[in-house]
Image (spheres, rainbow, N blue to C red):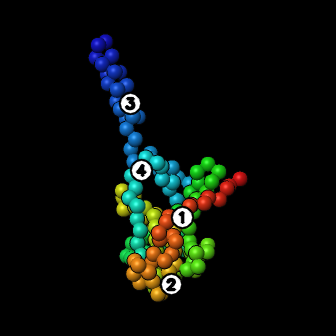
Amino acid sequence: MNSRIIRICFAVLFLVLILSVKPAFLRIAYAGDNPVISESTELDFFEIQTTVMEVHQKNNYIIAGEKVIQLLDFRKGRKRFRTMLRNTGGEETSLNTFTRGQKVFIRGFELPDGTIKARGIYQLPETVVTAEGLRKFSFAVKVPVWEPTIVE
C-alpha cells in the first residue's frame, strides 16, 4: 500500500515538473508554414547590408550575404504582420522585384537555432557602399513602425 502511494506521489510530482518547464517546441505556435515567435523565445537582433544571392519567391526566403533570410507572415489576434519589403524610394514592393546582385539592407532577428527572420528588407541604390552612405536613409537610422494588416 505504501509503495503505491509513493508511486502516485512521484507520478504527480513528475507531471508538475514537466508542465512547469516549457520546452522550446511549446514556445512556437504555427500559423501555416511560418512559425509565430512567442514572447518567451530568445532573440538576437540582426542587421546586415549585403547583396542578394538568390530569391526564392515560392518558399518566401532569400539568400543574402551567404545567409538564408526567411520572410515573416504571422497573425496576432486580428492583426497580420509581414516582412516589410521596400524599394529604393522607400515604397512598399513585392519579393519579385528583388534580383540577384542587388544591394539590400536587412533588419530582423536570429532565433537560437540560427534561423534568421526578416522584419524588413530594403533595396539600396548601387551608390550605397558604406555604412555612412546607408545613414542617409531614415530606415537605417530609426527602426520604422511595423504596421499590421487588420484581418476580418
Marks 3/4 in contact by CB < 8 Å: the verdict is no
Q: Which mark is residue 41?
A: 4
Disc 4 or 2, which lies upstream in sequence?
A: 4
Q: Can you see residue 53? A: no
Mark closer to the chain start, 2 or 3:
3
Residue positioned 61% across, 48% down in the render: 77
Residue at image coords 65%, 59%: 149
User: Rounded to the nearest whole Å, what is the CA distance between mark 4 and mark 2?
Assistant: 35 Å
The amino acid on which the numbered mark 2 sits, given as a three-letter code, is Pro
Residue 123, position as x, y percentages in the image = 52, 78
Observer-side mark, 2 or 3, equals 2
Kindly report the distance in space between the C-alpha atoms of the residues bearing marks 2 and 3. Answer: 57 Å
14, above or below 82, in the image: above
Q: Which residue is mark 2?
A: 125
For marks 2 and 1 on the same chain, the one whose residue lies earlier in the sequence: 2
Q: Secondary structure at mark 4?
A: loop
Q: Give, as a three-letter code, the residue at label 1.
A: Pro
- The residue at which mark 1 appears reads as 144
Q: Quadrant of the N terminus?
A: top left
Q: Marks 1/4: CA distance?
A: 22 Å
Q: CA distance from mark 2 to mark 1?
A: 19 Å
- Please name whichever residue, 137 or 51, is drawn nearer the observer in this view of the structure: 137
Q: Quadrant of residue 22?
A: top left
Q: Is residue 113 left or right of residue 36?
A: left
Which element is circle 3 on?
Answer: helix
Residue 38 or 47: which is nearer the viewer?
47
